[in-house]
Image (tube, grey):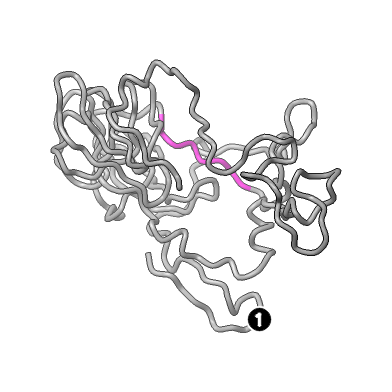
Amino acid sequence: MPIKRYKPTTPGRRGASVLASLSAGIQDVPHLLSGPNPKAAGRNNTGRITVRHQGGGAKRAYREIGFREQIKDVPARVAGIQYDPNRTAAVALLHYKNGQKAYMLAVKDLEVGDIVETSRSRALAIRPGNRMAVKHIPAGMLISSIELSPEKGTQVVRSAGSSATVLSVEDVYVLVKLPSGEVRKISCDALATVGQVSNAEWNLVRLGKAGRTRLRGIRPRVRGKAMNPVDHPHGGGEGGSPIGLTRPKTPWGKPALGVPTRRAHRSSDALIVRKRKKRK
């Protein structure tokens, strides 16, 4: 979707931009597919802040996306492409022939009026929005909303603009190249959606003013080197002094930036054919 720039009527508007056309078709959110989305402002069950820089923001209603329970073998018409405040991608409102309604992540080139379907047992037409077992998808095709195990629900490739590539079918596994560059074996019967996740230009939008960041529920961040030594390992010094460490640390002395977060010796390590590239 193209980026829209407004006339600079205010200082904040001067540097801001928005997505020009994110929504089409029906824009009403069905009552049965939405619910409350309470915020905890980064606090755990005892009230302590465990994730910093969160709080405030505009009130949001949650949209129930069919990540785990999809209506299978029933054609559905795309009734609307809608904005979802809880994710970067757009969502598609589906009206099924049996009268049911559901949301799915919209993919690139999916339009209002298109017919999509989900099936685990049979091959469907290779067109954007159709969802089937990866063994029925030809090599070289871009896919998204992928299950890692059958019936476990969509787990990977769900953010805006992301896509994976089917490489080959090997016995009971399909080799898939994920957005990180990792090549992984996925069960032949796992479901995936044909096409790239929509709204690839979302990261090109310029917020233009601090207020739009606060409306997203993000609070200000203070640099560690701007603090006192008692408050942060980077603190202290006269003027703009360096951190004095071989690598950045968190306020609690733990390594930060570029540290592997994947748990060692996971059972799924055997399914990784080629690991992702390391950050330099």
Please say whether residue 66 is one of the residues in the magenta stretch: yes
**x%, y% of residue 263?**
50, 23
Q: Is residue 5 above or below residue 73?
A: below
At a point 24% along the width and 45% down the height, the residue shown is 142
| Residue segment shown in magenta | 60-67
**x%, y% of residue 50?**
72, 34
At a point 44% along the width and 53% down the height, the residue shown is 82
- Which quadrant does the N terminus fall into? bottom left
Specify whether 123 is left or right of 4: left
- How busy is the neighbourhood of tag 1: few (under 14 within 10 Å), some, or many (20 plus)? few
Specify whether 38 is left or right of 268: right
**x%, y% of residue 67?**
41, 32
Specify whether 69 is left or right of 30: left
Amino acid carrying mark 1 in the image: Thr
Specify whether 230 is left or right of 125: right
Q: Which residue does the numbered mark 1 point to in the structure image? A: 10
Please say whether residue 33 is one of the residues in the magenta stretch: no
Q: Is 76 or 48 nearer to us in this picture?
A: 48
In the rendered picture of this protein, how many numbered marks are placed on residues?
Answer: 1
**x%, y% of residue 277?**
37, 41
At a point 48% along the width and 28% down the height, the residue shown is 262
